[in-house]
Image (cartoon, rainbow, N blue to C red):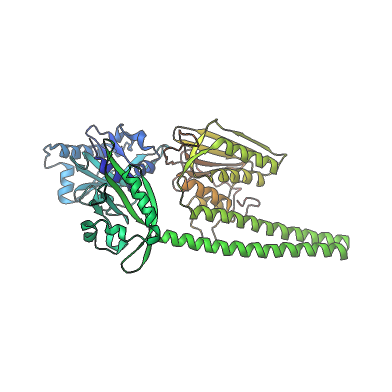
């Protein structure tokens, strides 16, 4: 048994990437966070050679480290010139000519190496390897992430030492805490020792208006159902804070033997969402009212011009009026899209199965109605289902509509959907002018947003945030004859009515990664920040 059920539940909930390697150098456990770092489904990694995904230049050194740590687990005698002994005893770095490095940390070895992603790229990971025997883990426990990591002295503490969450494992009747770690006092305003002595002190902090939902969540967990709940606490100093608590039961032989979860402070998120909602309401209200005044005034100017001016002068006035109307209508449309984006950002929703073929069909039908003379087509495997936010349909409609509105001449748009075991990819091929760097580089997080480098429209931001919050990617491939804008999201084998596993992706000139082979966007000579008609 490479990992105990209690530790498995805890590792499932933590935001750090965690994996366990057994004596045969196979993955015996991988949590979704670790799998998501490299774009795999966790189940696809379990049972396979853990080192087959490591960069060839890093693999020999990492294999030697893992093998030595496994020998430690098995109680094997190691020689004085062993690299891991040297690291653990002296803290010296081991850095050969490969890209894999290691350094001594208390209780384990810090490593850095490159791991292949599901898209075939190399992603550099950092973390620690911990040799552990028996409970809670039997084998080598690895914590990995792309950022710098801090050493710890205990396999479970490695998951909490860099986290702002409070991690806990409780008895099924909530009478005692088997494990608790993290910033208890700074988050809750209570001495950790008091929580350990009397776990129900946690419940006494719950805001009176939220206690009923906590009771329901506790009942669910005791009955063997995982849950997540957001609620308020009142600290002893009177401060009210919002917590998010994902938790799940620990089962052995179909019996609940413990409850594992984390306390996550989301007060800033709630405050930010409230501020966004207030500013959104004020902004949309002001824009709508003022633009209606502008449109009404423009109409009166046009009427007066028709009645009092000569034909030539009246025609010139009407041309200016149409410019005013177009700009005002565009601002109203932007305000509505901004509302959709704010709504998306303020809602905390998990991805769920979304039928792709009907969404593509409706997007294409709407585009054909918008431009009947255009050549707009699509291909989509029947039954294609994505694991995404429901707003995926809005994102697809936005991409297709953009391709039609910004076409260079008669629109020629094709929507191509491909499905693999892990990914649904929607590529929108158009004959528009190339999307300029000012648009796609800001969206792809390659440029900071400032007064010189920004996007003028909300459409691509809506698509980006739908992709990002669905665990997917948005990428661009630009050519002189048009663009290929690709939206990739996790696939699910379940129907749109039942739900299924979440899959993380990687690849392309993405919003958080390097360009994939053959998929990088190119900055052609025809692109510039001033390209007419390419604002998305």
Q: Is residue 453 above or below residue 13?
A: below
Quarter of the figure with residue 415 = top right
| Residue reaching furthest to the top | 382
Residue closest to the eye, 366 or 495: 495
Q: Nearer the viewer, residue 277 or 321?
A: 277
Residue 472, given in percent of the width and then of the height, sits at 47, 43
Q: Position of residue 89 (x, y in %)?
A: 14, 49
Q: Residue at x 64, y 58 (%)?
A: 331
Q: Nearer the viewer, residue 496 or 85?
A: 496
Q: Position of residue 521 (x, y in %)?
A: 52, 44
Task: Residue 98: tell me if it is visible.
Answer: no
Decide if residue 352 is on the left or right side of residue 11: right
The number of numbered badges drawn on the structure is 0
Camera sees residue 202: yes
Residue 32 placement (x, y as % from top left)? 36, 42
Q: Quadrant of residue 42?
A: top left
**Identity of the residue furthest to the bottom in this view:** 237
Q: Residue at x 39, y 53 (%)?
A: 213
Image point (48%, 53%), residue name: 347
Please identify the quadrant where the N terminus is shown. top left
Q: Is residue 182 left or right of residue 524?
A: left
């Amino acid at each position: 048994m490479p990992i105990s059920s209690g530790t498995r539940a805890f590792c499932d909930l933590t935001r750090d990437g965690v994996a366990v390697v057994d004596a045969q150098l196979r993955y015996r456990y991988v949590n979704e966070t670790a799998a998501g770092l490299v774009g795999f489904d966790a189940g696809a990694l379990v049972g396979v050679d853990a080192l087959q995904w490591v960069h060839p230049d890093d693999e020999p050194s990492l294999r030697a480290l893992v093998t030595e740590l496994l020998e430690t687990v098995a109680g094997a005698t190691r020689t004085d010139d062993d690299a891991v002994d040297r690291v653990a005893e002296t803290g010296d770095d081991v850095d050969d000519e490969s890209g894999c490095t290691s350094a001594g940390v208390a209780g384990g070895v810090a490593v850095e190496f490159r791991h292949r992603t599901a898209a075939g790229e190399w992603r550099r990971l950092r973390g620690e390897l911990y040799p552990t025997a028996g409970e809670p883990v039997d084998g080598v426990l690895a914590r990995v992430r792309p950022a710098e990591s801090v050493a710890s002295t205990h396999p479970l503490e490695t998951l909490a030492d860099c986290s702002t969450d409070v991690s806990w494992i409780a008895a099924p009747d909530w009478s005692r805490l088997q494990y608790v770690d993290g910033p208890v006092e700074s988050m809750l305003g209570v001495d950790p020792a008091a929580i350990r002595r009397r776990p129900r002190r946690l419940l006494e902090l719950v805001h009176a208006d939220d206690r009923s939902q906590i009771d329901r969540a506790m009942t669910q967990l005791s009955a063997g159902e995982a849950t997540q709940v957001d609620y308020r606490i009142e600290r002893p100093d009177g401060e009210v804070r919002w917590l998010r608590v994902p938790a799940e039961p620990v089962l052995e032989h179909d019996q609940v033997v413990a409850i594992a979860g984390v306390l996550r402070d989301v007060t800033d998120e709630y405050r930010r969402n409230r501020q966004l909602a207030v500013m959104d309401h004020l902004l949309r209200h002001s824009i709508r009212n003022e633009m209606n005044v502008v449109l009404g005034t423009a109409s009166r100017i046009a009427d007066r011009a028709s009645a009092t001016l000569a034909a030539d002068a009246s025609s010139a006035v009407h041309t200016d009026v149409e410019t005013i109307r177009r700009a005002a209508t565009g601002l109203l449309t932007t305000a509505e899209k901004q509302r959709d984006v704010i709504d998306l950002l303020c809602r905390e929703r998990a991805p769920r199965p979304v039928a792709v073929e009907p969404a593509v069909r409706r997007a294409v039908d709407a585009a054909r109605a918008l431009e009947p003379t255009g050549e707009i087509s699509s291909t989509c495997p029947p039954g294609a289902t994505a694991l995404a936010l429901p707003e995926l349909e809005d994102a697809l409609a936005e991409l297709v509509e953009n391709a039609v509105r910004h076409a260079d001449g008669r629109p020629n748009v094709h929507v191509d959907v491909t499905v693999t075991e892990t990914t649904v990819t929607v590529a929108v091929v158009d004959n528009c002018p190339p999307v300029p760097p000012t648009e796609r580089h800001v969206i792809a997080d390659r440029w900071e947003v400032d007064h010189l480098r920004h996007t003028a429209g909300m459409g691509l931001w809506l698509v980006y945030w739908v992709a990002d919050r669905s665990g997917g990617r948005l990428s661009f491939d630009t050519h002189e004859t048009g663009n290929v804008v690709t939206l990739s999201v996790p696939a699910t084998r379940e129907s749109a009515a039942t739900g299924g596993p979440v899959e993380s992706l990687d690849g392309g000139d993405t919003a958080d990664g390097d360009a994939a082979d053959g998929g990088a966007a190119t900055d052609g000579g025809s692109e510039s920040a001033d390209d007419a008609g390419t604002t998305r």
